[in-house]
Image (spheres, rainbow, N blue to C red):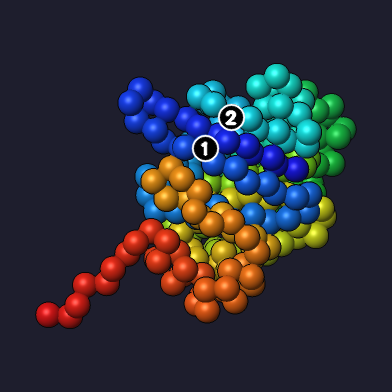
């Protein structure tokens, strides 16, 4: 579903991502890990077509993201880390707004809105303004808007950031349901325990370079450590001795 080959992105003299390559198969959950400033969000913005690459290629469902951008964007749903919605709108109004952007016919939009509000457990709050929603509810309505076009690939940038344990659990359940429906989910997160639970494979990036890619179980067996310890070793973290 995703094929990234030798991807590089420069901002002047700064190399944000350098010659990275990875893949994600159809129906797979791929976790994208790295410390702040590692290049995760830049990579996601290039894959979604919001930012041009300096070098390399990216394909989604076999389509080049630059040469076939229209076809690619039809197949992608995207939830940025800091999403902003018109908070005077209700969840139902917001989803209808995005359905119109995608040119979805009214009858089809009605059907999808009903399905998505049920999926993200916001049926009872559908008429309430988004400004009255909790952080977890706002994140779930964001997931719903990312799914309004029924994408094959869902890209989520820190989808559980700032959520309490219940909110994280609900988002995790939604991601698992999407996998069961055959959708590919590519998401970044700092919640390493959650990633270890949910993801089929992970890719770890540090200072713009891809360090590790593989199945979670294989990496844990290979390194004889949990995912958190593997991550800390890769980024070179050294705990300070107690005073």
Between residue 105 and residue 179, name the one nearer to us. Answer: 179
Farthest-out residue, top: 67
- Return the mark for residue 19: 1
Q: Residue at x 50, y 32 (%)?
A: 8
Does dot 1 land on a helix, a strand or a loop? Answer: strand
Label 1, label 2: how far apart the Cα atoms are: 7 Å
- Residue 22 at what x, y percent from top left? 63, 46
Q: Is residue 172 above or below residue 79?
A: below
Q: Say few, some or many: other residues with alpha carbon within 10 Å of mark 1 (under 14 / 14 to 19 / 20 or more).
A: some
Do the numbered discs 1 and 2 sit on residues whose CB atoms are within 8 Å? yes
Q: Quadrant of residue 218?
A: bottom right
Residue 57 in view here: yes
Q: Position of residue 144 (x, y in %)?
A: 67, 45
- Above or below, comparing residue 60 to residue 28 in the picture: above
Q: Is residue 18 left or right of residue 97?
A: left
Q: Quadrant of the C terminus?
A: bottom left
State the residue in front, 223 or 204. Answer: 223
Q: Which mark is residue 56?
A: 2
């Amino acid at each position: 579903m995703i094929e990234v080959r030798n991807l590089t992105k420069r901002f002047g003299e700064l190399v944000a991502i350098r010659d990275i390559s990875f893949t994600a198969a159809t129906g797979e959950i791929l976790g994208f890990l790295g410390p702040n400033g590692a290049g995760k969000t830049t990579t996601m913005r290039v894959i979604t077509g919001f930012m041009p690459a300096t070098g390399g290629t990216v394909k989604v469902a076999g389509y080049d993201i630059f040469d076939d951008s229209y076809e690619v964007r039809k197949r992608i749903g995207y939830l940025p880390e800091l999403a902003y919605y018109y908070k005077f709108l209700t969840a139902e109004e917001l989803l209808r707004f995005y359905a119109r952007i995608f040119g979805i016919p009214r009858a089809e939009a009605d059907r999808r809105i009903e399905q998505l509000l049920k999926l993200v457990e916001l049926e009872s709050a559908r008429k309430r303004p988004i400004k009255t929603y909790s952080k977890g509810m706002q994140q779930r309505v964001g997931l719903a808007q990312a799914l309004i076009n029924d994408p094959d690939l869902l890209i989520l940038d820190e989808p559980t950031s700032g959520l309490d344990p219940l909110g994280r659990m609900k988002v995790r359940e939604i991601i698992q349901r999407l996998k069961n429906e055959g959708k590919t989910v590519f998401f970044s997160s700092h919640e390493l325990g959650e990633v270890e639970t949910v993801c089929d494979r992970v890719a770890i990036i540090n200072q713009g370079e891809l360090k590790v890619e593989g199945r979670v179980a294989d990496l844990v067996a290979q390194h004889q450590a949990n995912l958190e310890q593997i991550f800390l070793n890769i980024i070179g973290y050294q705990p300070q001795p107690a005073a």
